[in-house]
Image (cartoon, helix red, strand yellow):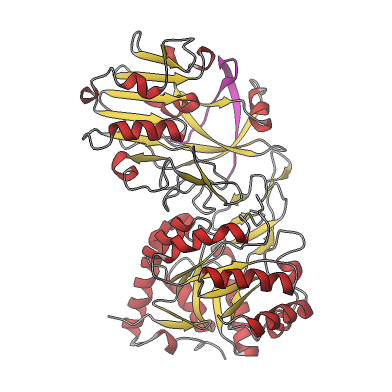
Amino acid sequence: MINRLKIIKKVRETPTVFSLYFHWDAEVLPGQFVMVWVPGYSEVPMTVASREGEKCITVKVYGKTTERLGNMGEGEFLYLRGPYGKPFSSSRGKKLLIGGGSGMASLRSLIDEDSTGIIASKTSDEILFEKDFKPGMAICVTEDGSRGMKGLAPDAINNLDLTQFDTIYVCGPEMMMKAIFDMLRGKELNVEFSFERSMKCGIGLCDSCSVDGFQVCRDGPTFHIKEVENMAEFGKTRLASSGKRIYMK
Amino acid sequence: MIDLRTKAGGIELDTPLILASGILDENGYTMRRILEAGAAAVVTKSIGVDERNGYTSPVVFEGENYIINAMGLPNPGIEEYGGEIKIAEEAGKPVIGSIFAADAPTFLKLAGEMVDYGVSAIELNLSCPHVKGFGTEVGSDPTLVKDIVETLKASIDIPIWSKLSPNVTDIVEIGSAASESDALVLINTVRAMAIDINARMPVLTNVYGGLSGNAIKPVGLRLVYEIKKELDCNIIGVGGIGNASDAIEYIMAGASAVQIGTALWRKGRGIFDEINQGISGFMKDSGIGSIGEMIGVAVQ
């Protein structure tokens, strides 16, 4: 079933990132996603965040479909199916949220009084959702040093006592998550990752998004660090749209 | 312990349940996991000569008890696919290589490469309903089907299965043309479409797709029954099987084994164990000692 939902508010988060708010009765848990169809263009997977009693998707413009979404405004309609996927197993307690690029959008529903954030991006223009955190609780890291610390997300972790957090949540490009995974593995920390892989069906049938036989759309997108430890494909290979195996760099 | 072994399409299977082509069989690790979860064998995604990305999404539409898909035969091309088969074969169970082409020489080339990769059998895709020049367009021409099947049977030493389409006027005519195959696999998806009334347009980018899931079970069952009755050949049943009773119906209509695909949508990998247990329970309660005792018993 495809839902048609009216956009009630549009917020410009950065020059290339927009949030589209809509009212939807469905229960969507942190970590779950929807497939957003733009008729005449294509369909893309998007995380749904819940903010102030309404739901929203956050769109980074990177192609024709997301450009069309980014140009949509109040009163226009979104077409979407879902929600899909396994939510984060817990959303309580003291949290560290590590988001790279648009990855923070997948963690946004988790942000509360008890959350510390590491917001990583290429430049200051791409820092997302800093104001959702309590003042002083968000650490910004940029590759060009235009905002906060200069470096990558893992560089910001080194300065933190990680044992203070009940759960660490990580979402971003796979190589960033792999670097963080390599730092945190074997440390008895409670870490959950939210994977981003190319999806076609969103319902566990087409095999496009699979990692080690797990379908990111159905078995994930959230995986506990214990599950990730046994994955031979994580951070190493993925399948292209054709199914051709690609080695990640 | 109930014996679920069966021989289908020239290969020995631990149970009658095979993963159908097109579902979760692009990545070798996925196929390996499905074999570990209880499938007796897997059929790969259909592989052609050249790399294809498939269609732009939406590529699926979800109904209540059915799916319509138009993936568009995405595949990495035969040269790139051997690695995936190798990973899947680590599970120690049969992997069947599905191939698609437009003529006999190309089918033969693809089959030869699949043999080199170590597959246990070849499944000819003569039935994909949504790609121009392939699938049903090939599989609805009895002369071409006969040429392809006979060409492969003459020079390929492993079993050849022909997966046929329900989208033909006379299944017996096509079945006869493919009758030299070690098994006829019935059925592929039923050509279909969906329209979104708010968007006022077809949902699938390709417009037409293939209907699968429980909604098509009665159609598949009828075609299996009809072929068994008219041609009495080895059949592998597929189409809308979601529980043990569905599988047993297909077996009683004449299938020596069955394939499961769309049911993974609602039930996940656990479907294989669930159906195996259900078949065992039925056989125990009914005093049936082997799968063979059930094959085709309903055919009148």
Residue B112 x, y percent position in the rendering: 61, 73
Count of numbered badges drawn on the protein: 0
Image coordinates for residue B293, horizontal then vertical, percent: 43, 89
- A5 left or right, relative to A214: right
Q: In this view, does A4 lie above or below B10?
A: above
Give percent across and percent down for residue B16. 44, 76
Relative to B265, residue B217 above or below: below
Front residue of B72 and B106: B106
Inspect the magenta stretch and tell me whether residue A4 lies in it.
yes
Is residue B225 in sight in this rendering?
Answer: yes
In the image, is B168 to the left or to the right of B13?
right
Q: Quadrant of residue B75?
A: bottom right
Q: Is residue A221 left or right of residue A41?
A: left
In reply to whether residue B153 is colored magenta, the answer given is no
In this view, the residue in front, A14 or B99, is: B99
Give whichever of A199, A237 is nearer the camera: A237
| Residue visible at 71% across and 69% down in the picture | B106
A231 above or below A185? Answer: below
The residue under the point 34% across, 43% down is A228
Residue A67, above or below B174: above
User: Where are the magenta residues, as a range?
Assistant: A1-28
Magenta residues: mostly which secondary structure? strand
Quadrant location of the N terminus of chain B?
bottom left
Report the residue at 54% width, 76% height from top. B121
A14 or B239, which is in the foreground?
Answer: A14
The quadrant the C terminus of chain B occupies is bottom right
User: Can I make out residue B166 in this image?
Assistant: no
